[in-house]
């Protein structure tokens, strides 16, 4: 694997720094706490503190879309960095330690007057996940927090769509674009979620047109971006950006670069336990492969393998050795 200059990360991801706090809960607890089961609810700092005190034993792990992608890249043997913002509390220390422990370069800014973002993920006996998310310091990112040296030294900078919804999100995107273009760093964007696209469609469309080298999204997000059906959305995406990878659930995924268009079907032998993080880990495989010179076929093959690992268990963090499960499907010398 090639490294970027001055030992900086070869792929830098940018987004919300969130600690996932995962605990088991009963339906009665969900009801008593006034939650909507199997949904994501935004909460404030006081509610986050109260909830933390009320839940039982929990597992705490770094999360957030772009951070998950950075972790996946690192577990594939890549050199990844993550730009985000945390508080000055225990969860900030947990987040930093957790991503550094797997080899991700923690390019974190701090906002001491805010708590680190956290998502309380309560899993009921029927495997349903009820999420309560406090965004806290994660959405306080500012243009000056964009680590210009790391972005300039990277081959690819990958921006999660969720960041655009932060108060200074658009300014952060613009700062990244300025630094990346001057340095020759490739810009990749994830559309992240349908609501992100619907809230920011014109601005995101223009940013992609003006600055992006590649887009990663699912078919629903593509349809919402162009307000049309899947096939027309793919055609319009090809007119908008030079390269994209678009996932489509049980229908697999497609990727294009210039005139080349490839597709792949998922492994239907894998039981779907939890789709959380599947798109994040798909991006890990795709970006790692493209950074290392893989063609589109090889890139979506690796992306499909890493995404399949994510859906095979509860939680976004890979539990299997990504290199070992990918080796049989990749060229003998791919992982060195």
Image (cartoon, rainbow, N blue to C red):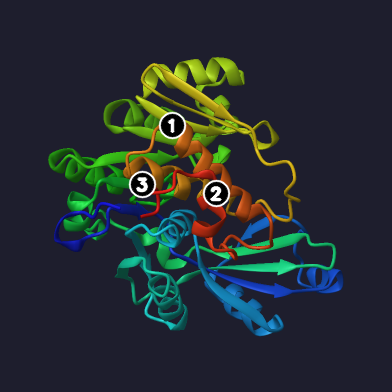
Q: Is residue 80 left or right of residue 235?
A: left
SS of the residue at dot 1? helix
- Tell me the number on the disc at residue 158: 3
The residue closer to the viewer here, 78 or 239, is 78
Residue 198 is at least partly visible in this image: no
In front of the other: 232 or 303: 303
Numbered disc 3: secondary structure: strand
- Front tag of 2 and 3: 2
Residue at x 70%, y 82% (from the top left corner) = 54
Q: Position of residue 222 (x, y in %)?
A: 53, 28
Which residue is at a point 75% across and 64% down the rendered structure image?
Answer: 35
At a point 81% along the width and 73% down the height, the residue shown is 32
Left or right relative to 25: residue 275: left
Which is nearer the N-term, disc 3 or disc 1?
3
Q: Earlier in the sequence, mark 2 or mark 1?
A: 1
Judging by the rendered image, the residue that carries numbered circle 1 is 296
Residue 83, compared with residue 183, is above or below; it is below
The residue that disc 2 covers is: 328
The image quadrant of residue 292 is top left
Q: Is residue 265 above or below residue 185?
A: above
Labels 2 and 3 touching (C-beta < 8 A):
no
Quarter location, residue 181: top left
Q: CA distance from mark 2 to mark 3?
A: 27 Å
């Amino acid at each position: 694997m090639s490294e970027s200059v001055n030992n900086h990360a070869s792929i830098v991801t940018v987004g919300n720094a969130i600690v996932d706090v995962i605990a088991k809960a009963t339906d009665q607890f969900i009801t008593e706490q006034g939650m909507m089961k199997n949904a994501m609810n935004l909460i404030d700092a006081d509610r986050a503190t109260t909830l933390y005190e009320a839940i039982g034993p929990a597992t705490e792990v770094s999360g957030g879309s772009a951070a998950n992608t950075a972790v996946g890249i690192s577990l594939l043997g890549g050199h990844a960095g993550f730009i985000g913002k945390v508080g000055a509390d225990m969860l900030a220390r947990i987040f930093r330690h957790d991503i550094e422990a797997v080899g991700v370069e923690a390019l974190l800014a701090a906002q001491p007057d805010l708590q680190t973002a956290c998502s309380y993920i309560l899993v009921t006996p029927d495997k349903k996940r009820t999420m309560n998310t406090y965004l806290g310091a994660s959405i306080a990112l500012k243009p000056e927090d964009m680590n210009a040296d790391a972005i300039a030294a990277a081959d690819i900078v990958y921006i999660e769509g969720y960041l655009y919804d932060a108060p200074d999100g658009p300014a952060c995107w613009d700062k990244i674009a300025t630094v990346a273009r001057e340095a020759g760093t490739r810009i990749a964007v994830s559309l992240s979620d349908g609501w992100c696209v619907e809230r920011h469609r014109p601005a995101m469309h223009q940013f992609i047109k003006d600055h992006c080298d590649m887009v990663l999204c699912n078919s629903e997000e593509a349809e919402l971006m162009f307000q049309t059906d899947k096939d027309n959305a793919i055609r319009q995406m090809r007119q908008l950006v030079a390269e994209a990878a678009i996932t489509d659930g049980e229908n697999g995924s497609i990727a294009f670069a210039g005139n080349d268009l490839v597709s792949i079907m998922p492994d239907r032998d894998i039981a779907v336990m939890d789709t959380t993080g599947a798109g994040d880990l798909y991006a890990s495989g795709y970006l790692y492969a493209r950074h290392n010179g893989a063609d589109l076929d090889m890139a979506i093959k690796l992306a499909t393998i890493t995404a399949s690992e994510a859906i095979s268990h509860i939680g976004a963090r890979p539990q299997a050795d990504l290199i070992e499960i990918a080796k049989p499907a990749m060229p003998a010398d791919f992982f060195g």
